[in-house]
């Protein structure tokens, strides 16, 4: 599995192009055009970083290799987020990731599991009886496809 490579934000002003630079101050990354600040985000806010650098590339203000050089991120990562920008715009960086639908929990299996949960069986017991991993059932409960019955004390 590839490891996430974070952008580097050194202290002081770092040039991206002749006209554009950034600096880190008080855990904020500030982008400067000349002496004017044009954008800022928290140094840990990867979504804003990816969105803004993709906008810079899309408007041909910078080249992908300028971002690679200035921030130390791989070119493949820059290209991946350019694709997100082209396909979904700025909103694409702030969407929740899509969830796959389960192949194991068919309507029949869900109905079976829910009836066992309604009878008071615990999730691991239900999983053993119907042959489904307990973790799968917990995900279905969190996703609202099943509801667990609280035991009375």
Image (spheres, rainbow, N blue to C red):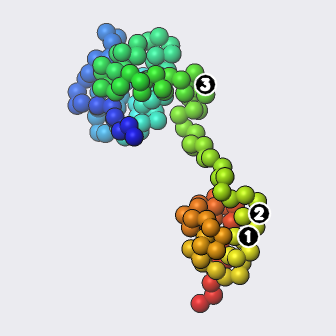
Q: In terms of sequence position, does the residue under pointer 3 or pointer 2 come before the other?
A: 3
How far from the left and from the top, in percent, is residue 123?
A: 59, 73
How far from the left and from the top, in percent, is residue 7?
A: 33, 31
The residue at 56%/42% (across/down) is 97
Q: Would you say residue 39 is visible in this rendering?
A: no
Tell me how many marks there are: 3
**Label 1, label 3: how many angstroms apart (C-alpha)?**
41 Å
Q: Which residue is mark 2?
A: 108
Farthest residue in the left direction? 11
The residue carrying pointer 3 sits among few (fewer than 14), some (14 to 19) or many (20 or more) residues within 10 Å by Cα, namely few
Q: Secondary structure at mark 1?
A: helix
**Label 1, label 2: how many angstroms apart (C-alpha)?**
6 Å
105 over 85 or under it: above or below: below
Q: Which mark is residue 120?
A: none
22 over 100 or under it: above or below: above
How far from the left and from the top, in percent, is residue 145?
A: 70, 61
**Label 3, label 2: how many angstroms apart (C-alpha)?**
37 Å
* Displayed quadrant of residue 136: bottom right
Q: Would you say residue 67 is visible in this rendering?
A: yes
The residue at 50%/13% (across/down) is 59
* Displayed quadrant of residue 75: top left
Cβ–Cβ under 8 Å for marks 1 and 2: yes
The residue carrying pointer 1 sits among few (fewer than 14), some (14 to 19) or many (20 or more) residues within 10 Å by Cα, namely some
Q: Which residue is mark 1?
A: 112
Q: Which mark is residue 87?
A: 3
The residue carrying pointer 2 sits among few (fewer than 14), some (14 to 19) or many (20 or more) residues within 10 Å by Cα, namely few
Q: Nearer the viewer, residue 136 or 69?
A: 136
């Amino acid at each position: 599995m590839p490891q996430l490579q974070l952008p580097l934000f050194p202290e002081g002003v770092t040039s991206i192009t002749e006209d554009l630079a950034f600096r880190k101050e008080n855990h904020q990354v500030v982008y400067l055009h000349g002496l004017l600040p044009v954008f800022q985000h928290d140094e840990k806010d990867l979504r804003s970083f990816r969105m803004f650098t993709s906008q810079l590339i899309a408007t041909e203000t910078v080249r992908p290799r300028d971002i690679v050089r200035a921030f130390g991120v791989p070119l493949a990562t820059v290209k991946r987020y350019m694709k997100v920008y082209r396909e979904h715009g700025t909103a694409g960086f702030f969407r929740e990731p899509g969830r796959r639908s389960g192949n194991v929990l068919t309507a029949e299996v869900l109905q079976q599991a829910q009836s066992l949960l309604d009878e008071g069986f615990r999730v691991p017991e239900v999983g053993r009886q119907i042959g489904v991993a307990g973790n799968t059932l917990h995900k279905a409960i969190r996703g609202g496809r099943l509801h667990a019955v609280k035991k009375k004390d």
